[in-house]
Amino acid sequence: MIRSNRSILKQMTHRTFSLSCVFICLSLHTLSVCAQDILQDANSVIVEARTEVLCKSMTQSIEKESLIITVLNRKGLDAAHFFCGCDMFRSLQKFSGEIINASGQSVRKIKKGELQKSEYSSSLSTDDYFYYYECNYPTFPFTVKYEWEVKCNNGLIGYPTFIPQAYFDQGVEIATYRIELPAGQRCRYRELNTQGKKIQVKESTGADGQQVIEATASKLSPIVKEPFGPDFAELLPRVYFAPSAFKFDKSESDMSSWQKYGEWQYRLLDGRDQLTEPFRAKLHELTANCATERDKVKTIYDYLAKTTRYVSIQLGIGGLQPIAATDVCRTGFGDCKGLSNYTRAMLKELGIVSTYTVISTTNERLLPDFSSANQMNHVILQVPLPQDTLWLECTNPSLPFGYVHQDIAGHDALLIEPDGGKMYRLPTYPDSLNTQHIAADITLSPTAEARIEVNEVSRIFQYENEAGIVYLEPNQQKDRIRSGIHLPQADIRNLQISECKEANPSITFRYTATSNQYGHKTGNRLFIPANVFRKEFSVPPLTKRMYPIHIDYGYTDTDSIRIQLPEGYVIEGLPKPLDVKSKFGSFHSDIQVKDKKIYIVHRLFMSKGVYSPTEYAAFLDFRKQVAGQYSGKIILKRE
């Protein structure tokens, strides 16, 4: 990951991210009187937050920060922790903190020496680290106040982003931001998700020609997390700030457009793709028997997986320049930049062109007319072959070759080409390919004991959701399988896992599950479940809906279940079959009986899309019908 962008909130490790800190200066009663509207649905409230950025030149600035947050309950405790990212360009100069109880009494002073210091990569050379303080005051509500100052030297490629609220269920009384730049130095800004919010931005000129931009947010009601709602990144109000021209570690350039920013990024790659002569010869030996360019690319990708590992590297131009390919080859480690550049260098030696590509794993869309470094946090590699364009995730080459994972599928990216940056949207997969098929053969005893033989195959995004199981210990793998089955005290045996790591990958689980209680017995009747494999299919309560309904990707779940009736029992009741279609998807269930066996088929298709809040009742009604089938009961009666 690029240092300056770890997530939509950690992108800016300046004042903006430190909204994960807190204080309540007034008593809770006073806060309630002045801000009753921002307390509703709130777990924490920002009473006052101030950021002042004083740019002395294109390479130096001082950031002064203060933050007061009230934590109302345990769910808001994360907002109480202090976090400040530093590196060779940024250093924490001053810090003080204070915890105040609900009665307004100071109960603890926090000094800079009490902050914990952590490196992102403790075992290898890195200049990236952060200070943090975990505030775990046990009695609610309480308030925390933080004040700190960060000094920036040797380059400013970006400025702190104004993020007045950093969490779901967080209200804001007042948050302000002020940036001042010397005459002749210009800052651009862009508001995002501020419509309908009490956020104002104004620009002025100081007495000596300074550019001054001030932003104010007041009386912000909490953003409530809704089931199937947008990601927080899509709701988070913020104001980006970026220089038009910048100097960074003796490197100077223009960021007025993505094309210009890409030109600078491309220059950072210059000379970083050199390889030693012995290693160049080895690459040709490795690929000597490859019939096509695609085969060569796969051979290199597989070699990368065997010989390297990911480590966060932040040396060089603020973590934005990859370490040299020769260093990755020698040490066997690198970050997303270094590993992608190393792969690029190996392919270049084989005569295969590839493109260093900057992308965000959190922001699906880049602002096309506002270029800034903090909109992206990751690097991958594009390989445009004649018959196909490959996207290589060099950070994690254990992913299937050519697979575009969920964190980047469909996202905007910036291709770093010789003539500058070019925006490009990555492909994604059709809904029809994201499938999971469960085939189960269930044998029941007269006492409701069960033995279940299961074969489960998951593909594409459904594969990705399940693939992490291969890295677990055997007992943990069984626990993972057990957690997805609605079956008390299930014992998982003979678990076999096979992974097909092709461009359209899949993973298969084969196992036997046994249980002493498959349903329950009442008198001379057995009440048994129709489907125990969809435990997590939920129907949230119907509440007033504010945001659109988001189904992030479409998928198909198909369950084929055969139940062998126990000796001495006949069927008394079966769930009714169902066929339902809606704009959200479709569901089909079929139940048949033949030769003392019950055959059940459940097929659910959910369609990717964004739907109006007004359709939430219809959406829940569709899910309720599906859930009713999944939780249906079969009644057996002793003959």
Image: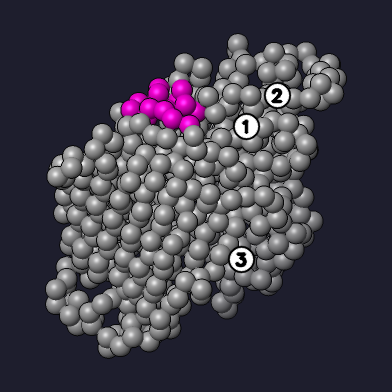
**CA gap, disc 1 and disc 2:** 14 Å
Give 483 or 296, whichever is nearer the viewer. 296
Q: In the current view of this chain or complex, which residue is farthest to the top?
A: 386
Residue positioned 22% across, 79% down in the render: 26
Q: In the current view of this chain or complex, which residue is farthest to the front?
A: 208
The answer to whether marks 1 and 2 mark residues whose Cβ atoms lie closer than 8 Å is no
Q: Position of residue 475 (x, y in %)?
A: 74, 63
In-image side of 143 versus 347 (left or right): left
In the figure, residue 151 lies in which quadrant? bottom left
Check disc 3 and give the amino acid type.
Answer: Leu
Tell me, what colour scheme is on the image?
A: one colour
Check disc 1 and give the amino acid type.
Answer: Ser
**CA gap, disc 3 and disc 1:** 45 Å
In the figure, residue 260 lies in which quadrant? top left
Q: Is residue 239 above or below residue 262?
A: below
Q: Residues within 10 Å of mark 2 (few under 14, many from 20)?
A: some
Q: Secondary structure at mark 2?
A: loop
Task: Choose the circle earlier in sequence order: 3 or 2.
Answer: 2
Residue for badge 1: 340
Residue 9 visible in image: yes
Magenta residue span: 251-265
Residue for badge 2: 274
Mark whose residue sits in front, 3 or 2: 2
Q: Secondary structure at mark 3?
A: loop
Q: Position of residue 435 (x, y in %)?
A: 56, 39
In the figure, residue 139 lies in which quadrant? bottom left
Residue 382 visible in image: no
Residue for badge 3: 487
Q: Position of residue 290 (x, y in %)?
A: 79, 16
Check disc 2 and give the amino acid type.
Answer: Gln
